[in-house]
Image (cartoon, rainbow, N blue to C red):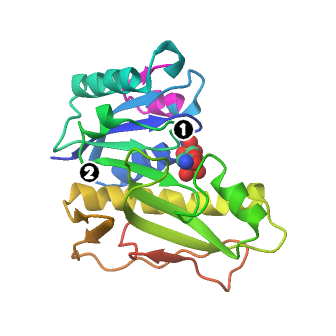
Amino acid sequence: MALPLAVLVSGGGSNLQSIIDRIEEGSLDAEVRLVISNKAGAYGITRARNNGIPTKVMSHKDYASREAFDRDMVAAMREHGVTAPEGAVVMAGFMRIVTPELLDAFPDRVVNIHPALLPSFPGIHGQGDAAEYGVRISGCTVHFVDEKMDNGPIIIQAAVPVQAGEDGDSLGPRILKLEHRILPQALQWLAEERLTVDGRHVHVKVGPKPLAAQPRADSEPSAPALVWPPLEEGF
Ligand code: GAR
């Protein structure tokens, strides 16, 4: 069975689109059964509708607590056939901390994408914070979610060089391109049940597919981006 997914968005939904595209191409064996947004105007909701995916807009402001909000999200996921242990939840630019109401319903099945090399630069401005700090390498991280913000066992990371004087606006798009590759790859590993969590460590079982060519950072053709574990064919 294709991996049943609920995707949570707060904004543009380009990571949602990368999931939809890989499913369409056949490299990701998943089905997006529901897209939930906490923001009514999120373009991610439009992307879902354009692809015939059921959507639900739930403003967190209408709820007395984070727990009550998460309870309703889990109920909506159940209604659309997204339950553990088969199903999984993707936080694709979802700018909310989640609670045990969601996490206990999906043990080791909630995944987040973050635009920095965690544990550095958590929060909502990962790209800008890294550029401002002056790091020479930044990137993105896909990890299992726990109760802390941008925390939890790391599945895959991709690194890009940072030029002196860059800001979040110039760095962000290069990181985003890699997000669109590592998030579907991590989900395909989940779909193939190749991930095991051992404390903070995630083991990826070796698969049959050969490695894909490694992506390169746009602004510095001589400097390849590092992705680890390596991307496989199709990602
Ligand atoms: C992405 O860059 C994602 O990594 C980030 O929000 C953006 C959403 O873009 N998430 C976080 O910062 C989580 N802390 P998208 O809506 O186009 O996918």
Residue 150 against residue 77 in the figure, above or below: below
Q: Is residue 100 magenta?
A: no
Q: Secondary structure at mark 2?
A: loop
Name the residue that disc number 1 marks: 95
Q: Is residue 56 magenta?
A: yes
* Residue at the extreme right: 165
SS assignment at label 1: loop
Per the model, the C-alpha gap separating discs 2 and 1 is: 19 Å
Q: Judge from the rendering whether residue 43 lies leftward or rightward of residue 165; answer left or right.
A: left
In which quadrant of the rendered view does residue 10 lie?
Answer: top right
Is residue 235 in view?
no
Q: Which residues are magenta?
A: 45-59
Q: Position of residue 94 (x, y in %)?
A: 50, 39
What residue is pinned by disc 2?
108
Q: Is residue 147 above or below residue 154?
A: above
The residue drawn where x is 41% and y is 37% is: 98
